[in-house]
Image (cartoon, grey):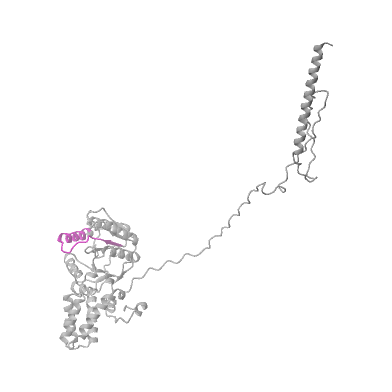
Amino acid sequence: MSSSTFDTLIIAAIGLAGGAGLVFIQVLIQWSLRKQRPAPAQLPRDLVEPMQPRAEAPREAAAPAKEVVAPPPRVEAPPPSLAEVPPEVVAQPPPPAPSPVVTPPPITAPPPPEAPKAPPLLGLGLRKTRESFLARIRTALTGSAKLSEIYEGLEEALIGADVGVDTSLKLTEALRTKLKNESRPDAVRDALKGEIAAILEKAELPMADPGDVPLVIMLVGVNGVGKTTTIAKLAARYKETRGPVLVAAGDTFRAAAIEQLEVWCNRAGVEIIKQKQGSDPAAVAFDAVKAAVARKAGTVLIDTAGRLQTKANLMEELKKMGRVIGRGLLGAPHEVWLVLDATTGQNALSQAKIFGEAIKLTGAVLAKLDSTAKGGVIVGIAGQLGIPVRFVGLGEGIEDLREFDPHEFVEALFAGGEGEGDVASGSYAA
């Protein structure tokens, strides 16, 4: 054998020995790691399914001189059941929230409609007037024993109660004639009560009856007397008694007058006929009358511009409106009412006198009667002008308008003021 062949064998032997050593070291490392790994959890025998050992591909021998022993096959356990997994490891989905039980609302009958509020008693609105009037009359009847002085004091008391000079003189003269020498306070008081009732009843006029056509009412008066609110109260009242109501916004001069009237018409639930500010008020009234006839409305209420009774040109405008309304409906306006502020006393009487000379008045509406002691002007209007008081305002509410009754007024004016208990019982005495 040659030396080169020998060297080759030595090199091959060294290589085989080195490879076998490396394989042996690798086997020792794997055995050491496997020994440090914890043993698998023991499961019940019935849950462990026999598994076939995984066949591994035969490893080629690195050297024929030494055989490498393969490690024993590893048995993998099946995944544990959900019953054995602790709750903190496997999160279970939250159970669905129970659907709320909806209880149907109980079926209740609708509440009955509220009855319309009745207007306040006339006696309640005359509290201030009655107290002032009776105090003056009582002073006149008990201040002197002489008959002439009693009548003079009575005349002054009536004038002070805003009855008016002319009407006061008529009343005292009628008492002198009727009572002659009778001076007992009760007799004078009863006689005065009868004379006032006679004046009011004499001025009474029946309301116009237009038949099948709408009732047309024109309302006049100066600014600030409560004309707009009075129209709304009348509209609400006639809506209940006569059916649909149309309101003509004839005050086209005053700023925001149309808007203010529209607000009140909305509260009353009635329709308003209007044009822009500055329009001809007669044209507005004519359109309202024609619309009421076409729609078969029950009532037409015509607002007019507030004007001073001393302005002749403005008073002529009222006459023009009356003529134009008559062209739209024969016989209209059926009623012309003057709205007065009861708190102005004798000034209201002066307004009524001037308006009565310009146009034919068929009635008066006295607003704000509940807030004044000058309600005696009602007697003056009936005595001097001969026109009836149609309605009186006794509050700010839309239902606080009461139809005037002369008999009720006289009874309330002369009620003895028996006490506050009478208010609760509905008596005229407040």
Quarter of the picture containing the C terminus is bottom left
Looking at the image, how many numbered discs can be counted on the residues?
A: 0
Residue at the far right: name it.
1
Judge left or right: residue 24 versus residue 190: right
Q: Nearer the viewer, residue 170 or 213?
A: 170
Magenta stretch in the rendered image: 299-324
The residue that appears at 20% across and 79% down in the rendered structure is 157
Judge left or right: residue 275 versus residue 155: right
Residue 94: image location, x then y, percent = 63, 50
The residue that appears at 40% across and 68% down in the rendered structure is 115
The residue that appears at 75% across and 39% down in the rendered structure is 36
Residue at the far front: name it.
3
> Residue 286 colored magenta?
no
Q: Is residue 293 visible?
A: no
Q: Is residue 233 visible?
A: yes
Quarter of the image for residue 100 reads bottom right
Q: Nearer the viewer, residue 15 or 322?
A: 15
Residue 71: image location, x then y, percent = 79, 33
Quarter of the image for residue 280 reads bottom left
- Say above or below: 202 vs 11: below
